[in-house]
Amino acid sequence: MRRVQYHRYGGPEVMRLESVEPPLPGSGEVLVRVVAAAANAMDWKIRNGEMRLLTGRGFPRGMGNDFAGVVEAAGEGVTRLRAGDAVLGGTSIKGAGAFADLVIAEEKAVVRKPADLSYEQAATIPVVGITALQALRGKEKLGPGHSVFINGCLGGVGRAAAQIALTCGASVAGSCRTPAADEARGLGIAPLVGFGFDPAELEGRFDIVLDTAGTLPNKAARALLKPGGRIVDIVPAPLKLARSALPGPYQVLFGRTSTTDLDEVTRIAARGELRIPIAHTVPLTDAIPALTDLEHRPGRRGGKLLITTR
Ligand SMILES: NC(=O)c1ccc[n+]([C@@H]2O[C@H](COP(=O)([O-])OP(=O)(O)OC[C@H]3O[C@@H](n4cnc5c(N)ncnc54)[C@H](OP(=O)(O)O)[C@@H]3O)[C@@H](O)[C@H]2O)c1
């Protein structure tokens, strides 16, 4: 089988498309024949070594988390899935390796793909869908009368959060680049502001402020909140983690593997209420230049990079 992998942490130059022996699923794992895989910023953060405390020193390491495909084999103890099932899911951070013909994943991180969701659409869902769902979940169930502000509302997580919040009946406002405002309005996001907005315009209006870009100053985020509201930041940094440990409205969120949550976002997507645009689709043989370009190109991407095997 072919797999995009690397033999040391580093920049895009360390990626190789290599032939490897197909792995065998261990206990609680499934082996999936990948149809489509989607790129996330975490793929290159892991490859750069930014998460090496979690990912360790074992090489070669595969790249890619999100995938959709067909179960090839199920390991011992797997009860929900079997060979032939169409599925979508994510790898473990330590395992990775979705940019490949075959990938190993834990059963708990994989769900059945509804027939009315294409493999391509399904592959875009896991990381952004689960993160968005978990960011919106609070003590009180999100619903009509609640309002959410999303900094970076047209990125993967931002767009997923906007669509999920709107599905729940909440109102959604957000920031995006000015030329993209019509697209955001089309999703039902209003009001819209540019990235350098003045928080005084929207003071005290939101139950949740979700910062998907990690760029919103804490003072600005607090200014946007209603009393009792909360700030969710998904781009961690040491100072932010320290702030998150203090009592108050600020929280750094790390998306967690959850079969139930992946099932829920998959159902929302299958109903057509969650769509992540696909900006670019390439075969596995062209994955490395496409990933390199994605990583280096600043500014709007307009959707996911998808890597297909067929
Ligand atoms: N903690 C977790 O569990 C978790 C999970 C998933 C992702 N993440 C992290 O969260 C971040 C977003 O992920 P993603 O998949 O949504 O990435 P993405 O698709 O690249 O979206 C990032 C968004 O931020 C916008 N943006 C860029 N500069 C901005 C600024 N100065 N102010 C406001 N918005 C700005 C981008 O706009 P343009 O497209 O117009 O540039 C884009 O809409 C990444 O750093 C990722 O690693 C964390």
Image (spheres, rainbow, N blue to C red):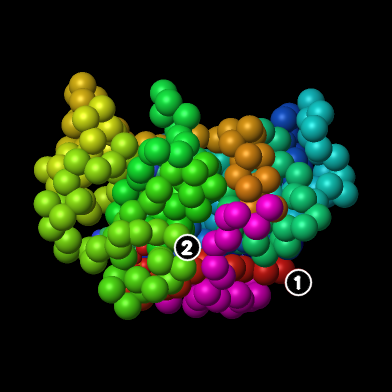
Looking at the picture, how far across and down is residue 113, in whole percent?
Answer: 75, 50
Considering only order in the chain, which callout, 1 or 2, is on the residue closer to the N terminus? 2
Numbered mark located on residue 125 in the image: none
Please state which of residues 82 and 23 is positioned toward the viewer in this rendering. 82
Taking the spot 87% from the left edge, 45% from the top edge, the residue there is: 83
Q: Is mark 2 within 8 Å of ligand 1?
A: no
CA neighbours of label 1 inside 10 A, class few (<14), some (14 to 19), many (20+): few
The quarter holding residue 276 reads bottom right
Image region (quadrant) for ligand 1:
bottom left
Decide: is 270 above or below 258.
Answer: below
Q: Nearer the viewer, mark 2 or mark 1?
A: 2
Quarter of the figure with residue 277: bottom right
Q: Is residue 271 left or right of residue 164?
A: right
Residue at (28%, 73%) from the top-left corner?
178
Q: Which residue is tagged 2?
A: 187
Span of residues in magenta: 271-293
